Image: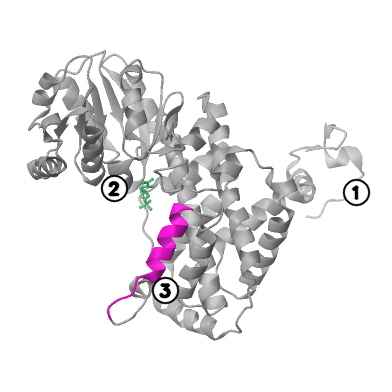
Amino acid sequence: MQVALVGLGVMGKNLALNLIEKGLTLVAYDTNPDAGEELLSCAKTQGTAERLHIVSDLHDMVRRLEAPRSILLLVPAGELVDRVCQDLVDAGVGKDDIIVDCGNSNYKDGIARKLKYQNKFEFATMGISGGAEGARHGPAMMASGSEGGWERIESSFEKVAASYNGESCFARVGQSASGHFVKMVHNGIEYALMQLIAEIYQLLRLGAGKTPQQIAEIFDTWSEGELNSYLLAISSHILKLETTDGKALVDLIDNKVGAKGTGLWTAQNALELGIAVPSLVAAVQARHLTNTGDTHAAKEMTYAAKATERLDIDLDELKDAFHLASLLCYRQGLALIKGASRAHQWKVDLAKTLQTWRAGCIIRADYLDQIAEGVEFIDTLDTQVKALRRITGAAVSTGLAFPVLSATQNYLATLSTPSNGHLVQAQRDYFGEHGIKTHSGEVCHLTDLVEIDAKVR
Ligand code: 6PG
């Protein structure tokens, strides 16, 4: 099997090494000749260089590939994708060839590109997760579309992707550009889980007075059981890291959090589609808040918070709360995928989506089994529900910030307790005559049900 790859940055280089290691023949190109040289030298070290051809221009790439061609793009999302597509067309790519955009592109661009290039070549999308390590040894691959070219290449990707219990973490999750939507939501969940872990750390550190080392040990204990996840494991590892003079590494790092945009897109799409993902939105805004705060004041406040009375936290209860909150973050993401799939008629298969997240990706976790089995959170996890409620209450009472924990508790409470929407509906009708619906299904106005002599002005 022969494929081409354009873009030899960190992800591209590592995926290239993975592809040739799995037996594919690769033609690779990057505008920077040093990137090609570096890849070649790594391939020589791994003994696979005979399957690698570095080319110095796209014409050469297209010439070397047997038609129909399969080309992967690992270039930064945005205009560059279009520029490379056009260059490939100019270099001779044709109707039967497939070009797969594997970057963190916006799915809306993917839909537009499918239309734009439909008479030139097959344009397909695939979200890849797992960072450099994942790309090198087996990433999660969220592909989409029904292009004929997939038939040629997907069995190879099944081997290149990570596997979980013998099942590949490559899947064509749905139609059109849904692979990029699924990857985007993966990142939205990623933001929420990262922030949630940071909040649990904060509660233990400033609320309960534990050291980073002690918190790492708690995370390790949790990881031995059902809570084992990649993000918890790396957090524990990070918390154990110390400088040569014994300072915790985390204490040297500025609090401002960066973001490349996929979390924001998740929040924007959820709001546009009217699907509630409060934990995911809160995580995006938590990052925004780290950039707007006065760091000096925040530091002072941190010391003030340190001086507050220590909380006596029941670690089993905290574990239960963390477990349920994590599940609820996935639940919100999956609800968003389901809603978008319905709105766009993508026919996204949620089971296949979860299959791609089982290994190789950043949000892989052992408890995804529970989600795959369709656990009904609200009815069956009573102990955890109580734990989440109590832990959130205790956390908030410290005065510290717990945006994702609180948003998740509110999400669960909104779904599982009586709503107050009737009063809001009444308010809307009171001043705007927007109409109400009664329990018997009648659509009317307040004034149809009661006499209102004079409205408050
Ligand atoms: C992955 C990651 C990867 C990257 C994101 C998030 O699945 O491998 O999600 O795609 O970490 O771009 O980055 P930001 O936190 O910078 O938005």
Residue 181 disc label: none
Residue 436 is situated, as x and y percent measured from the top left of the image, at 79, 38
Residue located at (45% from left, 82% from top): 300
Please give the residue where the numbered disc 3 appears in the rendered image: 294
Give the residue type that dot 2 points to.
Answer: Ala
In this rendering, the label closer to the viewer, 3 or 1: 3
Please give the residue where the numbered disc 1 appears in the rendered image: 453
Residue located at (85% from left, 32% from top): 442
Identity of the residue furthest to the bottom in this view: 307
State which quadrant residue 413 falls in.
bottom right
Give the residue type that dot 1 points to.
Answer: Asp
Helix, strand or loop under label 2: helix
Nearer to the camera, 344 or 198: 198
Which stretch did the figure color magenta? Answer: 229-244
Please give the residue where the numbered disc 2 appears in the rendered image: 132
Give the residue type that dot 3 points to.
Answer: Asp
